[in-house]
Image (cartoon, helix red, strand yellow):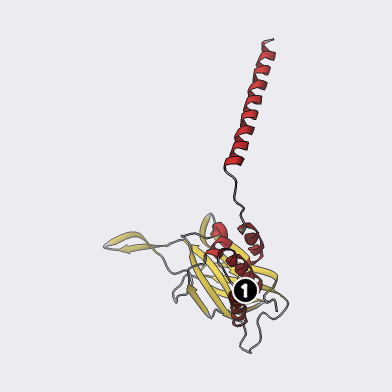
Amino acid sequence: MKYFNHISILVCIQFILFATGCKVIDWGKDNFKQTERYDKEFVKHIQPFLRTTFVYDQLATIADFDAMFLTDSARMLYVDYFKQKHVLSEEKESVMRQRLINENKYYISFYILGSQVENLYPANRSLFTGEYYKQQALLGEKDAEWQVRLKVDGQEYVPDSIRVVELPTEWQHFFGTRYSQFKSVYLVKFDAVDTYDREILASGKHTVGLQFISARYKANLEWKDIVYSDK
């Protein structure tokens, strides 16, 4: 008999908790109506242009790289996202789109985020023994820790320019949690034509890769069957 009484009590408690929980949920919905997140669709559609890789040595993370391939489609998606926040006339929007498309005719560009561990060096001098850390530049400088190469359908190309940049807000959202204050941000550009003045990414699909090379390690990012130009 006591057993059944205990079951009855438990059932009553669960019912009370369930009923109370429903009221709390309803109250929350009525008083904290959620704002629609229009950015989610843009972030979803940018994913095919985004790649990430980590460089591991056993259980230690040596470096990590995130790259956004700035194809025509990626740039146009950026404009679509940009105009949601900023008031653009049709003329300004058209000029912005044309400017970005024209830039892609001259350069193959990537936004690259990266971070690396500090290098640990032993010191055995008489006045100072032990170890010390030295942080070298990640990319772009003469003594940078890493060099980057573009690979298109098996051919390699060196950058035309690598520079540290402030990442626009819209691109920050595109990178999501990959973007942080602990990562360096670079805009890396390659010439759109080879030494024979031929388009590196002519119309059609290509296999495009970025290769990061240090004195010890290599890391690769790859976009298979990607279309660079919408023309």
Rendered location of residue 199, percent (x, y): 66, 84
Nearest the camera: 14 or 190?
14
Number of numbered discs:
1
Q: Is residue 72 above or below residue 60?
A: below
For the C terminus, which image quadrant?
bottom right
Residue under the point 53% across and 81% down: 160
Judging from the image, what secondary structure is the residue with disc 1 in?
helix
Comparing 99 with 131, the one in front is: 99
Disc 1: which residue = 90
Residue sticking out furthest to the right:
204
Q: Position of residue 119 (x, y in %)?
A: 43, 63
Q: Residue at x 49, y 59 (%)?
A: 180
Left or right: 80, with 204 as reference point: left
Percent position (x, y) of residue 57?
A: 53, 59
| Residue 204 seen anywhere in this rendered image of the structure | yes
Say whether residue 65 is visible: no
Circle 1 residues within 10 Å: few <14, some 14–19, many ≥20: few
Q: Residue furthest left?
A: 127
Q: Residue furthest bottom?
A: 196
The quarter of the displayed image where residue 224 is located: bottom right
Under mark 1, the amino acid is Glu
- Examine the rendered structure and indicate whether residue 165 appears above or below residue 9: below
Q: Tell me where residue 102 appears, x and y as whole percent.
A: 61, 81
Q: Quadrant of the N terminus?
A: top right
In this rendering, is residue 158 above or below 62?
below
Image quadrant assignment for residue 157: bottom right
Give 2 or 65, whichever is nearer the viewer: 2
Residue found at x 60% / y 47%:
34
